[in-house]
Amino acid sequence: MRTPPSHDGDVVLGEDWVAPDTATSSELRDDRARRSIISLRGSPLARKIITFNLIALNVLVAGILYLNSTRDSLAVQRISALVAQAELVADVVEAQLPAGAPVNLATGDGVDVDATLAALDLRRGHEVFVFDTANMLIAKNQGTLAPLQPESASGEDLALLTDGLSWLWNAISGPFASEPTAPPAIEEQLRPLVARSISGETQVSEALDGAGGALFSVVTPIEQGGSAVGVVALTSASGEIDAMVRSERERVLQMFVIATLVSIGLSLVLASTIANPLSDLATAAELGRDKNARKVNPGRIRIPDLTARPDEIGRLSGALRGMIAALYNRIDGNEQFAADVAHEIKNPLASLRSAVGTLRMVKRDDQREKLLDVIDHDVRRLDRLVSDISNASRLDSELVKEEEEPFNLLHMLGNLSDYLGEDARSKGIEFISDLPANPIEVQGLEARLAQVFVNLITNAISFCEDGDAIRIWARKRENRVLVVVEDTGPGIPDQALTKIFKRFYSQRPDEHFGNNSGLGLAISKQIVEAHGGVIWAENIRPTDADITSEPLGARFVVGLPV
């Protein structure tokens, strides 16, 4: 296994590099130590996640409590039971009435109503009343049996959550509520029902008792010979339904509290898996920004490696690491370019300085003319260098700013062949253009790619002599197009094949020294690679089997995606 070299504090951010724990900056480690898993104060994102989850849960519970049909169903069941009991009591009284004789319930003529009611077994809280046809109360009785209590109802009076919410609501609405009025006695509430029940129909109502509890009443007629001689009224226990509903709401609120705690816990876990990695990424970027701004402890920005995560945070980490790597590659390239520029400019400047110093000492006119020629050559060389360096330095930004468009590559190559072919033929060089008939469209910057082929063709012309030939041809291969520029010049020295695309490198005869900056092929390579293509150079040999044979010329190949 190959061990990566040490970089004295710098971290190499390659695609396959995984940052060890020791590579994390001390500032980032300190920030992680200060930030716990439940650090809500320092994480707005975590607060938002918890808030939104709780809002959804509260809306759900509020809807359950508001739209809960438990009370309605319990009320329907209780009323049905009361109707059955009231009709049963009326049947008992009717069974004691003499057949065919008129009955007066007020005088007890024909039936002892008090004794009949006293013999009934009613649960505590229930009351039974008997009224005559004149709406007068004849008799009443209260239940004495203990109410039925299911085993699950033990301790149900302890409803802390429900009572607490009720108290809070009363405290809030108390100042705005009107003074409650005491409801009338139960007998007075039953009299309107009695009057309507005399017609022979059972009446049902829901009212409030003195304590504010729900009270259900059922009034049914006592009939003899098809006509009503009185009515029986039966009332439920005060607040019976309210107690059941209160118990159900208490269970719902208890589940709500449990669900809230679980939701907060899960939200914290979710927030920690989202907010903490994002905070690490932001902290790493801010540390790099602050270091560069203060010029203190300048070091490479260390972006945490979260690419193992199969989510958007992993993608973000990979994208940031790639951006940082590209940025430092660009910085390193600019530093190297600046060093190369300084080196290249120093050469003509040194020659100029030497020529100017010598010019002051020479006396002969022919020597002065030679020195002036040297000065003129060096000045033109500096001018060419500055122009080419300016173009090269603007190339990166222009490649990013300009919009790529589809264009016909063969049409552009045909125009270049027509123009540059004339220049080659004027020098006695045969120029051959071998382009397909069908158009080939590529996506890119036409002017920049034209600059590439102009560089290649003019470079070939500069190396050819009278009687040589240049051939440009193109072929489409699946999803790529190959454009080849060949010449029958002297070829490329083997040791220079890997160097000719470097900046300021030039392999030319001595008589052409200083006439080229050595940036043309480097710029061409940069343009081609910006379009997702490749470019390389090779020698044309009589046979591939003998690589030591003298080259027949040079070949430059450009591959572009289509």
Image: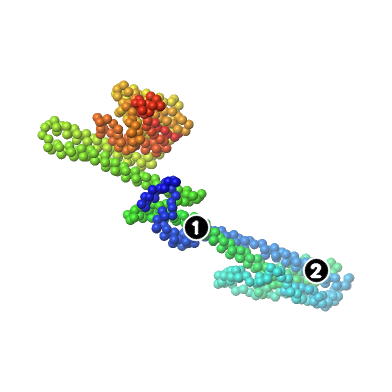
Q: Is residue 93 above or below residue 255?
A: below
Residue 45 percent coordinates (x, y): 48, 57
Q: Nearer the viewer, residue 258 or 10?
A: 10
Please name the residue shown 36% across and 55% down the image. Answer: 290
Please name the residue shown 86% across and 68% down the image. Answer: 225
Kindly identify the amino acid type of the residue bearing the numbered disc 2: Leu
The residue wearing badge 1 is 272
Residue 380 percent coordinates (x, y): 23, 35
- Frontmost of labels 1 and 2 is 1
Indicate the quadrant containing the C terminus: top left, top right, bottom left or bottom right.
top left
Please name the residue shown 23% across and 38% down the image. Answer: 348
Q: Secondary structure at mark 2?
A: helix
Alpha-carbon neighbours of circle 1 within 10 Å: few (<14), some, or many (≥20)?
many
Residue 433 percent coordinates (x, y): 38, 24
Please name the residue shown 29% across and 41% down the image. Answer: 340
The residue wearing badge 2 is 88
Kindly identify the amino acid type of the residue bearing the numbered disc 1: Ser
Alpha-carbon neighbours of circle 2 within 10 Å: few (<14), some, or many (≥20)?
some
Q: Nearer the viewer, residue 46 or 493?
A: 493
